[in-house]
Each structure stands twice: as C-alpha cells, then as structure tokens.
Amino acid sequence: MRPHSLRDLKKEATAHALAKAAFELALEKGLDGFVVEDVVQRAGYSRRTFANYFSCKEEAVAMIAMTFDGNVDEDQELHIDLAERLSPLDVLHRWLQARFTADLLGKVRELFTLSRRHPTLEPFILSVLKRLQAGAEEELRRYSADGRDIVYTHLLAGAVFGAVLPILDGTLKVRLPGDPEDRAPDAIPFEQHLETTFGYLKSGF
Amino acid sequence: MRPHSLRDLKKEATAHALAKAAFELALEKGLDGFVVEDVVQRAGYSRRTFANYFSCKEEAVAMIAMTFDGNVDEDQELHIDLAERLSPLDVLHRWLQARFTADLLGKVRELFTLSRRHPTLEPFILSVLKRLQAGAEEELRRYSADGRDIVYTHLLAGAVFGAVLPILDGTLKVRLPGDPEDRAPDAIPFEQHLETTFGYLKSGF
DNA sequence: AGGCAAACTTGCACATTGGGCAACAAGTAA
DNA sequence: TTACTTGTTGCCCAATGTGCAAGTTTGCCT
C-alpha cells in the first residue's frame, strides 16, 4: 500500500527499529525500568530522532503491534479474489484472520500484560488498534463495489474492531499473580472466537 | 454507583476541577498554549496533585468527557424498570441515549476538533471511551437476568461502543479549515444515527 | 466525643522528557 | 550533475514525572 519510496522504507525501518527496541526493553526491564536513552542506544539512533517518531516510551512500545517481524517491506496484502464478491463483513473476517497471526497474538499478549501493571500504556494500545482499523477500512474500500456508503463501511469497521478487544480478552486471558480466579471458561482459540463473533454480527445480537 | 463516601466525592471534585480547567485552557489557548502549572493555578491545586490524578495534560483534557456539568454528585442512574425485560442491546441503546446529552456531544465535538490538530490527544479520547464502555457494562450486568454470559455482554458492549466512534464522526462532522470537501451527506442527528446503528446490530450487518 | 489509622495534598529535589532551531546528510527529481 | 526536499542529529532549556516526607483531612471504632 501507499507510496513506498526508498525514503518511506527507511522511515518505516527506523520506526520499527525504535519500536522493537522499546518493546524488548519493556519486556526485559518493565515499563519503568528503562529510559528513552536506552531505547535509542539499542536501536542506534539519537534521542532527538526518537522524539520525531514517538511522543513517549509508551507509544513506541505499543506500536510494535503494527509492525511485521522479518521483512518489513513485504506487503501484507489480503489477496482476495474480487470474483468472490465477499460481503464487507466477510472481508473484515478474512482481514482479521490474516493479520492476527500467532506472532501478533503473542505480542499483544505481552502488551496486555504490561498494560495491566502500567495503565499508562492502555491509551496507546487502543490507538494502535484504531490504526489497524483504519488500515482495514482502507483495504475494505478497495474491494467494495463502489465508493458510496462510506458511512456504512465506517460503522461496520467500528463495530467489528470494537469487538476485537473483548475477543482478545477472551483469547488471551491475561492474568497476573494475585488476580482473582473467575469461573468463566478458559481461554478460547482466536479463530473460534472470531467465528462466533462474526456470527453475531452477521445475524444480529 | 460505587462507594461514594465523602472522600470519594472530594476526589471526584478535584479530578473534575482539574479536568475542567485543563479543558477550558485547551479551548482558549490550544493544546500547547498552556502548561500544567496554568491548569493547577486555575483549579486551585498544586502541580504535584495534578500528577496524582493525571499522567499528562492530554489525559486531563480528554477526561472532561467523563464528568458531568452541574451537580457532580448527582447519580446518573438509568432508572430502567426491571419489569420491562429489555434485551442487553436495548439497555445499551438507552444508556447511550441517556449519557450522550447535547452537553456531552458538545464537549466531544470540541475534543475531536482539538484532536485533529494535536494527534497526541487521540489515545486518551479512546481511553475515555473505553471507560464509558466499562461503566455501561457494569450497569448492564445489573439488569441482566443472571451473572452468566459475561463474555457475551463483554463482546456486545465492545461492538456497540466500537460503533460509537463512527456514529460520533457522522454526527459531528468535525472539519478544519483546509479539509477536503467530501460528497457524503451532511451531519446526521445523534439519535437517528443510533437508531440505524442498533438496527444493524439487532438484525445483522 | 475522642482518637487512631488511612489516605489525600503539598513542597521539594532531581532525573527525564519534548520540541524549536540550525546544521548536516541522504533521497528525489530534473 | 545540480537543485530541492526531507530525514537525522546536537544543542539547549522549559516542562514534566515521581519518590519522599511532612502536614492535613476523612473514616472508623471504642
């Protein structure tokens, strides 16, 4: 998607490097166990550059959920056959299936765990989720017949991604020592959770 | 809701006073036209106390959407007749109707406008929305027959509140000078937007 | 009522942070 | 190549976040 000039690639690379370093440090030392200086040293950039990309540690840490692991430049296209004439709902379903790989789910689990101890992280996690939603919407518009009904698409994406957080809660069941045991059933696989959720969305709650 | 001891009331009052001062200053001078010191001077507290309640200006500004105007202590109860046996969906519908008064919508409009110029505000707006969602869920559980199916409630609330943001977009149509004109229809009243949205949620997208 | 315990507020100190500015370097287009 | 745009960095300083300890208010129990 998007321009993807060499310049943009390098920008993505630096952002990814910084986010990765921040995320790793957060896992190793905890959110307040390191400072921005540590991040930029690990990533090989200056403190000033960090500020050009992120407004604070938290934002960088959360951003890890938006970046891909290995080859950064590999386009994560959906590759849906237009002839299938999928409904917008099904497109989003596939989009979520494709994006939320085991790798991403792992990262999200770490993020959620961190977020429990450090509530300041939560707003930025939500913000990242919203960016994912925006990306999905953009892609969805590419598969929809015509550009009309942007409002419907927008609404649909909102409802779907609003459900993603509860789905992740149910999938990951992040728990800290000292948390109360609940009587709810155990963690449910993401795929299965998606199934039932899209069932509700398709035929009504 | 909740304890509401005298202590809690005072805490809410200080939080509200600080948030209000921050919000007003943001409207008057823009998000970066004032500092925390200005906020606490207006509200009559110390800088240290501000830090006890909020982690940054942005958080305080966004928080205004959670507080009520006049009488802070007036409980914003829903007052739903249990005999009505409303579906969870309808309870949330009423909850949104009751909470999103013209006053709140006005505040939200200002917040969205600020957020356009200062993206750092966005994560905290999302965070506030999630708090509202948590409150609604809590209240919903009070009206639901039994405590089971917490997962369903959680999922439902997620989908509903996920749709709230697009609804607000459609309702408020926040625009800055220099924004591109779009060909989408004009702003739609909140009530009406809710109607159609809950229609989708009830009978499927 | 009296008094103890819990917890909110504040000042202080200090490391950390954000961001304007200007110089330099790297990518882009002609 | 040359000119232009844009990312990176250092410098600098106002602003911020937070632990700690003292002072004050609230809650609760006898």
Image (cartoon, coloured by chain):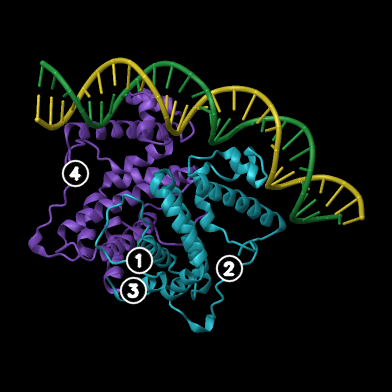
Chain colours: A purple, B cyan, C yellow, D green
Chain letter for mark 4, please: A
**Residue topped by disc 1:** B187
Marks counted in the figure total 4
Looking at the image, is B129 positioned above or below residue A65?
A: below
Q: Amino acid at mark 1?
A: Ala
Residue A176 at what x, y percent from top left?
A: 48, 46
Per the rendering, the mark at residue B196 is 3
Label 4: few (<14), some (14–19) or many (≥20) C-alpha neighbours in 10 Å: few
Q: Amino acid at mark 3?
A: Thr
Q: Amino acid at mark 4?
A: Arg
Asked if labels 4 and 1 share a chain, the reply is no
Tell me the CA gap for discs 4 and 1.
Answer: 30 Å
Work out whether residue C19 or residue A169 is closer to the camera in this orientation and state it: C19
Tell me the CA gap for discs 1 and 3.
Answer: 14 Å
Which comes before the other along the chain, label 2 or label 1?
Answer: 2
Work out whether residue D23 or residue A106 is closer to the camera in this orientation and state it: D23
Q: What is the quadrant of the C terminus of chain A in the image?
A: bottom left
Work out whether residue B70 or residue B88 is closer to the camera in this orientation and state it: B70
Q: Residue furthest left?
A: A83
Q: Nearer the viewer, mark 1 or mark 3?
A: 1
Tell me the CA gap for discs 4 and 2.
Answer: 46 Å
Q: In the shown orientation, is residue B155 left or right of residue B80? A: left
Q: Amino acid at mark 2?
A: Gln
Q: Nearer the viewer, mark 2 or mark 1?
A: 1
Q: Nearer the viewer, mark 4 or mark 2?
A: 4
Tell me the CA gap for discs 2 and 1.
Answer: 28 Å
**Residue topped by disc 2:** B76
Q: Is residue A177 visible?
A: no
Q: Quadrant of residue C25?
A: top left
Residue at image point 12% right, 56% down:
A80
Chain letter for mark 3, please: B
